[in-house]
Amino acid sequence: MSLSTMPTEILLMVFDPLEFEELVCLLPTCKHVRQVAFYCLSKIVDERIVESIAEFQENEDKRSKTVPIKDLQILRNHEHDMSMGLHIGFTVVDGENKKTSEMSVSDISHFLDLINIGVKTGKMDLLNVEMYISEPVSDNSRFTRLFIALKHYSLTRSPLEFSITSLSTRLKPANMIRLFDTTRLTKMTLFFEKFRWDNWGTDETTKYIKFVQGFKNLLRRVKNLEQLEILLDGPVGFGFPAFPPGLAIDEDHLEELKTAFLALEKLHTLKLNTLLIHPSFFLPVPESVKTLSLAHVIYYSKDWWDEFAKYPFKNLENLELNICGNQECFKQGGVGTHLAPGWLSEGAKGYIIGDVKIRGLKKFDFEEKQLPYLPSDLIPCILKQNPGVEGDVGKRFAKEYSATLIQKCKEELIQAMVWKMFESEVSADVERRFLENGAQEDDLKKCTLDYLARFSGFLTEPAIPPPDLADVKGKSIATDF
């Protein structure tokens, strides 16, 4: 007699002595065996979660004592994410008293007490659980064992009984899969590792492949994800050199990553607060995305903006471009001062993309301070193809564009004057006219027009400054005058 034909009562006796891992191996079999194995598995998980909770609460000490994360932004700043910070929000459905309530705690013990009640009575459900876990908590071995027990509990419960739907943590993707039931997540915040392309070697190659594979595997598991935010694990500017041309990387890994990302069919909000992999890597946005927020865009390369311009955002309604996003900017002096040393052309400054394929935007927002570092025609192209954009975006850009253009005019004029490029030529013409005609009332006007004509030619065909004057380029006006 095979397992598939055995009566349920006999199967229960056969499966009773089996270990957890052995029962898990029976789940992919036929429906009858799977149902009985799952029942036995649920009993083991219930026993384990009760034991894990008891062990955690009995042995709780100062080293595992958590503190409230008063400002959830604290997770986004690595320098400040040093405390045992924890935040858990959830909906309690009390079946016995027929009550539903919203709760928020920083001490996990109360949360665990409610799970105990749910296991023992079957009348306490915890839904829409959102967790914000600081790095010290995720690195704590006692919490790690507890999270694994909670994962198994989630896997053996209906989403209407227990579900962690929101997770924000600094865990690596592989560890998120190991510690949590990611299949029920609808909202996720994770941190992307920073790769040192300027110091590339075997160790970095292994690290890069391992992380990309982990990220790809995580994306394949979060099919229900609706909101995703990706940040960088550390400051964006310093220590983030541009991807050097000619560096060989395995493009197959990147293509698999793109495929996994495009499969997020329920994703409607995407926030990219960091570069991904390297400044030229463009991650295609799923068709379902309606809100896209891009931060630290001053670091994106010309190649990235080319991909952005030709990408068909089919359902995008809201677009936001930020300098710093949700991470704090460096306080040393504002935008531009925290660009990485040797950054290529300071992003896409002055670059022309020609056109964009974005259509149907309803809302578009950007920070004026970043305009000098974006493709020069990016905003006009977006506004031209999206006449339905709400608000005064066009007026704001016109004002900033005119101010930027005037400043560039000043810089070009001052640069030409500092180089003294036309002084000798204009002076020679003035001397010639004086010798031929003597002093005239309109000499100043002719001199000015002559100088401006030469300056106009300089703008269309810039000349190279003499070697002895090249060092004055870029000096401040206060220094030169």
Image (cartoon, rainbow, N blue to C red):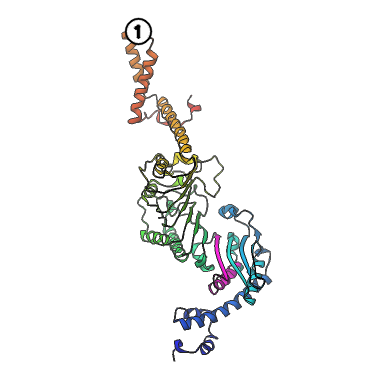
Residue 50 locus on image (x, y percent)? 63, 75
What residue appears at the point 41 percent right and 57 percent down from the top-left corner?
Answer: 287
- Residue located farthest toward the left when viewing the structure as drawn: 436
Name the residue tied to disc 1: 438
- What amino acid type should be assigned to the residue bearing mark 1? Gly
| Any part of residue 461 in sight | no
Look at the image and say whether residue 167 sits in the magenta stretch. yes
Q: Is residue 13 left or right of residue 110?
A: left
Across and down, in percent, residue 157 comes to: 55, 73
Q: Is residue 431 above or below residue 273?
A: above
Residue 318 in magenta? no
x, y (%) of residue 65? 67, 63
Which residue is most to the bottom? 1
Label 1 secondary element:
loop
Is residue 127 rendered to the left or right of residue 480? right
Residue 63 point in image, percent of width and height: 66, 64
The image quadrant of residue 94 is bottom right
User: Going 44% across and 92% down the picture, which residue do you hit?
Assistant: 1
Is 285 positioned to the left or the right of 72 in the image?
A: left
The range drawn in magenta is 143-169
Position of 138 compared to 422: left or right?
right
* Residue 98 appears in the figure: yes
